[in-house]
Image: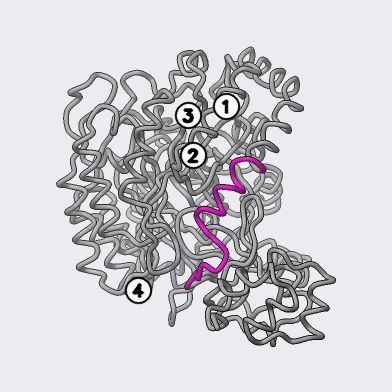
Amino acid sequence: MMIALIDGYIDEPGCLGVPPYLSPLSRYLYGMLKSNHSDWIVNYLTIDQIRSHEHQTDSLEWMTAFNLLIFISGVAVPGKYLGGTPIKFSELQKYGSHFPSLPKVLCGPATNFGVGEEGGKPSKSVANLQDYFDLIITGDAEIVLNILLNEGLSSSESLWNLKDYFQAVKQERPNIESLQRQSMDEIRDFAVAGAEVIDQHPNFDETTGGNLICEIETFRGCPRHRSGGCSFCVEPTKGKTIHREINSIVAEVQALYEQGVRHFRLGNQTDFYAYQHGDYIHSRYPQPNPGAIEQLLQTIRTRCPQLRTLHIDNVNPLNFALYPEQAEKITKSITEYCSPGNIAAIGVESVDDCVITQNNLKANAEEILEAIRIINRYGREIGENGNPKFLPGLNFIMGLPGETEETLEQNSQFLQQLLEQDLWVRRINLRKLLVPSFFDQEATREVLKHLRKFSSNYFHWKKFVREEIDMPMLKKLYPIGRILKDVYAEVHDGKGTLLRQVGTYPITCFVPQKLSLHQFYSLVVVNHGYRSLTCLKAPVDFQRLSQSELVEIDGIGKKRAITIQVNQPKTKKDWLELIPDLWPIVKKIQPSKGN
């Protein structure tokens, strides 16, 4: 039995799975298949690998060697990706129709919430793909397929006739595709067995670990499910929270670590601070559990002593507003046990009270500010890799019902407050609302109409945020001369290279030189973009820099670059005589020039 597990990538509010991230679902499915049928050949393939193969050979016929194709899809919060491109609806149609005789399964968040491709547009329902796939699993794929394949093996049905078998089962058991796990214990063995799949991932390197970062699930559901959660979000539809045991999470991380993975993100949940939460002392939100979180982080660190990245994702500011003592303890644990460069992604969405009320958003402006203050109090220290240890990241959504021009102005004033109060945030994400498939037609029409009407407003607001907030903030966080360590070269860009550290929302670094890819480098910051840094390989020797490298340094244009190359200043005296105002920058970039 040969199975192709095709990762079309997941990007949800509570999960990242676009490379270099690897989502849990891919590993659960692989682990389920191999733990029950060790003799089966399961080939993990990313959608980008399939595209590349098709481009090179102009053929998909090689895929007919498989007995079963399993497609994973699920982008609810589309963004701009450097490491891969999620599968498109048109591609699902193409691959689904191209192999009429092959059994095909579609699973992942897209089966419930549609295929999202661009913010500001509706997601596309997979109902239109029914003719192309034998199973469209809306429940937990690892549970559904485990039942079906085991029953198929034990019955008289032949696995080589899976298409007929799937059709027969669907008629006999109409709800089979929607089965869900009843307990997190059901995935424990699959999660551990699934660690082997990383050997097939293109971002993994058995010597260094590569830049592959494994997303780890801690719990499912939304702590605000009682109130319905945010009106546009897919997470509340998953119901109340069900949590994994600490030893189950640690066993999975340790299995991946022993397989060679060195980068982990405890990101697959709606709010890391709510892991194994307590009772709803306040009706708006449950009480955090600092002891459980400290034990989880401490145990991972003990069992995996050589890991290089341990990050989290998603933090609800209500923890800080309603339970400040517990939230502060958790923040301390994160800064102690996690690696630097960590980010608490906070879904602000909007600080306009009207929008907050109409969309049942989680917190108001002052509650969000308090969370930012406390995280800054403990997380601003610069770690060994050159990053602040732990900072907030803010997400805003454009196009929410109730939004007006005043909304954008209030959001702007809120962000200006951060600079005025010297509160650091690592990144500000601005995106248009991706209209979920569960919005009714009238609501969808109204949102799309508003998005079109406000397109000019959004353009000017984004321009303001990038120029007046992002740029000054980056200069605070990454001043010229800052050394960044373990920065991974991902792709060439023109005559330069784009690199990122491994972690949660790492900043993109541009080096004006074609470096060897898939290697780690130390860089020094020499200039700032709105959302990126310009860097040079460290250590810097001004006498060896090319003109193209010199012109990228803040304060040096083409004319000055030529002057430097012609005169070759070496000492402080040389620089002060040649271009005196550049000396402070030179001293930061090349500290040995201090004399």
Q: Position of residue 106 (x, y in %)?
A: 53, 45
Q: Amino acid at mark 3?
A: Cys
Look at the numbered disc 2 and give the secondary structure of its residue. Answer: strand
Question: Which dot, 2 or 4, sits closer to the camera?
Answer: 2
Residue at horizontal 69%, vertical 67%? 581
In the rendered image of this protein, does residue 587 appear above or below residue 252? below
Amino acid under disc 2: Leu
Name the quadrant containing residue 311.
bottom left
Name the residue: 79% across, 75% down.
561
Is 200 placed above or below 358 here? below
* Residue 155 in view (yes/no): no
Q: Tell me the kind of residue under disc 1.
A: Ser
Q: Report how far apart the C-alphas of labels 4 and 3 lie in the structure.
A: 35 Å
Q: Quadrant of residue 336?
A: bottom left
Q: Vertical placement of 15 versus 481: above or below?
A: above
The residue where tag 3 is placed is: 233
Say what secondary structure mark 3 lies in: loop
**Can you tell which mark lies on residue 394?**
2
Q: Earlier in the sequence, mark 3 or mark 2?
A: 3
Q: Which residue is mark 1?
A: 437
Q: Earlier in the sequence, mark 1 or mark 2?
A: 2
Q: Residue drawn 45% across and 37% down?
A: 421
User: Which quadrant of the figure has residue 534?
Assistant: bottom right
* Magenta stretch bounds: 467-485
Q: Nearer the viewer, mark 1 or mark 2?
A: 2
Residue designated by label 4: 259
The Cα atoms of the two marked residues, 1 and 2, are separated by 25 Å
- Element assignment for label 4: helix
